[in-house]
Amino acid sequence: MRRRIVLQIQIANKEVLIEIAKCHQKAFPKSLLSNLGINSLAKVFEWYLTNERGIIYYIKDSENNIKGYFCGIITTEQNLIGANSSTFNYAKFTLTKSFLKKPWLLFHPEILSKIRNLLAYSFINFLKVIHKKRIKKLDQDNFNFIPFVGLVIIGVKEKGLGYGSFLLKEFENISRKIPMVKKLQLSVKAENRRAIKAYLSNGWTIEKSEKTYFKLYKIL
């Protein structure tokens, strides 16, 4: 008979960032940040502690072992920068030192993907300016804007034990208590079918589907 695991949700602090970083490496061993090292990871996660928009929680078992975590970002105004840009700016000196030690990571698939996306985004915006549609779209986006919390990442040390679902529900519960927030949203890689299925079964809706990623949302 399997022993029932009792989990507790805790707001993160500086003392547990290294353990959360290790959890991330276990959950995403091939990711760029995992390869950059524990110090880079911990510095990136530190942003969520120091910025009022940041949210970072972790779960632990009865023996105080960290089993997983999630990070989120609060957006109550249109056109605020996202989590990737915010954390990079905060941790840029630590990240730069890590890249200098491991320059081959500049050719990591995540770096190349970001460059391609940036070029595509810049080209599309250039076309919008030419056709004089950009201002109209921005006005419409501002009119339709709903304050939201973005789920940046969920990481668990062991899969198949329900940690991910537990963290997702806690993320939703915590987000409901934030003033003004009426919506949750996230992006997930299209290849991560297991995660997409889990989000859909928890009441999330697909807002946008692309070749490489899906964008989902949930109204609170």
Image: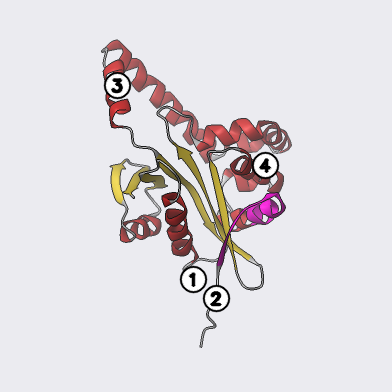
Q: What coloring was used for the rendering?
A: secondary structure
Task: Give the residue number, with chain letter if any, for mark 3.
Answer: 139
Residue drawn at point x = 32 percent, y = 53 percent: 204
Check disc 1 and report the residue beneath it.
161
- Circle 3 or circle 4, nearest the eye: 3
Query: Which type of secondary structure does the marked residue at label 2 adopt?
Result: loop
Q: Can you give x and y, in whole percent of width and height, for residue 19 in the image?
A: 67, 57
Which is more N-terminal, label 3 or label 2? 2
Residue under pointer 4? 43
Q: Residue at x 36, y 56 (%)?
A: 199
Residue 196: x and y in percent read 36, 55
Counting residues from the N terminus, which is met first, the one under dot 3 or under dot 4? 4
Secondary structure found at label 3: helix
In-image side of 143 versus 27 (left or right): left
- Amino acid carrying mark 1 in the image: Leu
Q: Nearer the viewer, residue 46 or 154?
A: 46
Q: Nearer the viewer, mark 2 or mark 3?
A: 3
| Residue 5 circle label | 2
